[in-house]
Amino acid sequence: MNLKLDAKITLALYNSVRRHKYVLKAASVVYRGSPLAFFIVYAAGGAWLYVYGERALFSYLAAPLCTILTSYGLRRLIKRARPYITLGLEPPEGGKAGYSCPSNHAASAGAIALALMGISPGFGACACVLALMTGLSRVGMGVHYLTDVLAGYALAGVFTVAAVIWML
């Protein structure tokens, strides 16, 4: 995607969130709460598989782990500054000045949501909606460009497909 177009889309989403106080509040809640929610759900799914379905446990654990490790490594290579730094936006409270691409939160949320689809399609679909909300909240709060979030989701998809193929 063109970098100028990426910045325009990111600014449009950021401004849309900031324009409405209830949308900003919701984005802030998702921004702050979704990492803990995904951690708890991921741990619960792993525990369930440990007790009831050991065969799928390895791929359930491996896909999100490989996704997040790759995401951290790519960040160190790409070194893209966060939008609130490059575009002069108001950072969220407690925002860190790290690198932004790919979005680790989008990558891990996407990978966990896709892994949950293998346990319970209905529960996994709900987790996918929360993963999408997580990514949008990251853009709306000014900590990621839209392409950072899409890159995180792409990593989640690649490692989930690899895990599923490995299980066949």
Image: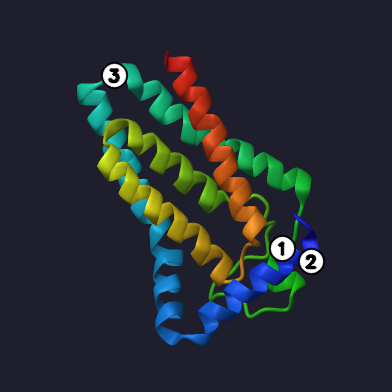
Mark 2 lies on a secondary structure that is helix
The residue nearer to you, when weighing 119 against 6, is 6
Residue 166 coordinates in the image, percent (x, y): 48, 16
Residue that numbered label 3 is attached to: 54
Residues at circles 2 and 1 in contact by the CB criterion of under 8 Å: yes
Q: Quarter of the image holding residue 30?
A: bottom left
Mark 1 lies on a secondary structure that is helix
Q: Residue at x 66, y 74 (%)?
A: 11
Per the model, the C-alpha gap separating discs 1 and 3 is 42 Å
Amino acid type at image mark 1: Asp
Q: Residue at x 47, y 45 (%)?
A: 110
60 is higher (above) or lower (below) than 126: above
Residues at circles 3 and 2 in contact by the CB criterion of under 8 Å: no
Amino acid type at image mark 2: Lys
87 is higher (above) or lower (below) than 37: below
Residue that numbered label 1 is attached to: 6
Number of other residues with Cα within 10 Å of mark 3, as a class: few under 14, some 14 to 19, many 20 or more: some
Q: Quarter of the image holding residue 23?
A: bottom left
Q: Which mark is residue 126?
A: none
Per the model, the C-alpha gap separating discs 2 and 1 is 5 Å
Per the model, the C-alpha gap separating discs 3 and 2 is 47 Å
**Along the horizontal axis of the image, is 88 left or right of 111?**
right
73 is higher (above) or lower (below) than 11: above
**Along the horizontal axis of the image, is 93 left or right of 79?**
left
Residue that numbered label 2 is attached to: 4
The residue nearer to you, when weighing 17 against 89, is 17
Mark 3 lies on a secondary structure that is helix
Amino acid type at image mark 3: Glu
